[in-house]
Image (cartoon, helix red, strand yellow):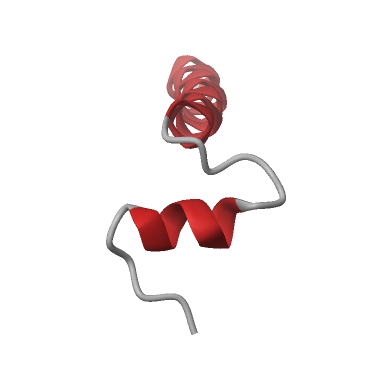
Amino acid sequence: MSEQIDRLLKEVSASQVDWRDTLMGAGLAGNDWPLVAQRLGFEIA
């Protein structure tokens, strides 16, 4: 069971890094993310 928990924690940690890398790669990590998202075609209210 401990091995499963260790793997879960490792995978969660890796997915968090990937998510931030994805935001940065799309230009959505800065304060101007709403403008960038609109330029990409998303409607921001």
Camera-side residue of 22 and 1? 22
Q: Could you say where residue 17 lies in the image, as x and y percent from the top left?
A: 55, 24
| 20 to the left or right of 26 | right
Residue drawn at x 53%, y 59% is: 35
Residue drawn at x 52%, y 18% is: 10
Q: Is residue 19 above or below residue 11?
A: below
Residue drawn at x 55%, y 32% is: 20
Residue drawn at x 43%, y 56% is: 37
Disc tally is 0
| 42 to the left or right of 6 | left
Query: Within the image, what quadrant is residue 43 found in?
Result: bottom left
Q: Could you say where residue 36 lies in the image, as x and y percent from the top left?
A: 48, 51
Camera-side residue of 20 and 6? 20
Camera-side residue of 2 and 21? 21
Q: Residue furthest left?
A: 41
Q: Residue furthest bottom?
A: 45
Query: Within the image, what quadrant is residue 34 found in?
Result: bottom right
| 23 to the left or right of 42 | right
Q: Could you say where residue 12 lies in the image, as x and y percent from the top left?
A: 50, 31
